[in-house]
Image (cartoon, grey):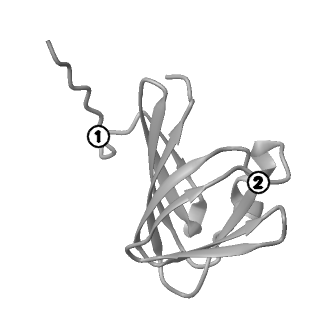
């Protein structure tokens, strides 16, 4: 028999606040987590994630869809990429991110290999 597992980001497993710069909700099924982030202009990985991550850049693979706004990725090798409304991205480890521009950035982000 087929099984369907359901989690709601409106009733997340966990959430984090970035103060006036946004928030994120997390839901996990098996080893896959989905994150809904609402990030305000001025949000950056360096300021809001790096202090708790304990690494100079993000060590995770991300699969992401940009619902609105723009986000810029700075890769450890010096390259840069931007995701904008409607973009689908696969981001390898070794990146830092920040909201680009003056519009709120809303993202759906899938991370695999996590423990529930």
| Left or right of residue 44, residue 99 in this image | left
Per the rendering, the mark at residue 8 is 1
The reply to whether the C-beta atoms of the residues labelled 1 and 2 are less than 8 Å apart is no
Helix, strand or loop for disc 2? loop
The residue under the point 41% across, 77% down is 85
Q: Nearer the viewer, residue 114 or 44?
A: 114
As rendered, which of 99 and 66 lies closer to the eye? Answer: 66
Q: Does 21 appear above or below 12?
A: below
> Which residue is painted at 56% across and 29% down in the image?
114
Give me the residue at 76% from left, 44% from top: 53
Q: How many angstroms separate mark 1 from mark 2 (CA)?
A: 29 Å
Mark 1 Cα shell of 10 Å, populated few (<14), some (14-19), many (≥20): few
Residue 65's spot in the image, x, y percent? Answer: 42, 62
Task: Give left or right: position of 29 versus 73.
Answer: left
Residue 18 x, y percent position in the rendering: 59, 59
Q: Residue 22 location, x and y as percent?
A: 52, 64
The image quadrant where one finds the N terminus is: top left
Q: Is residue 74 above or below residue 34?
A: below
- Tag 1, which secondary structure? loop
Task: Tell me where residue 45 sits by quadrant.
Answer: bottom right
Residue drawn at point x = 30 percent, y = 34 percent: 7
Depth check, front residue: 113 or 56: 113
In depth, the one of 49 and 28 nearer the eye is 28
Q: Nearer the viewer, mark 1 or mark 2?
A: 2
Which residue is under mark 2?
94
Q: Residue furthest top?
A: 1
């Amino acid at each position: 028999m087929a099984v369907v597992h359901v989690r709601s980001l409106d009733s997340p497993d966990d959430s984090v606040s970035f103060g006036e710069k946004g928030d994120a909700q997390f839901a996990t099924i098996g080893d896959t987590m989905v994150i809904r982030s609402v990030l305000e202009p001025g949000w950056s990985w360096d300021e809001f994630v790096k202090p708790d991550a304990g690494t100079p850049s993000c060590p995770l693979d991300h699969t992401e869809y940009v619902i609105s706004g723009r986000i810029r990725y700075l890769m450890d090798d010096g390259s840069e990429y931007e995701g904008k409304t409607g973009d689908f991205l696969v981001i390898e480890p070794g990146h830092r991110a920040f909201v680009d521009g003056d519009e709120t950035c809303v993202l759906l982000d899938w991370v695999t290999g996590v423990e529930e």
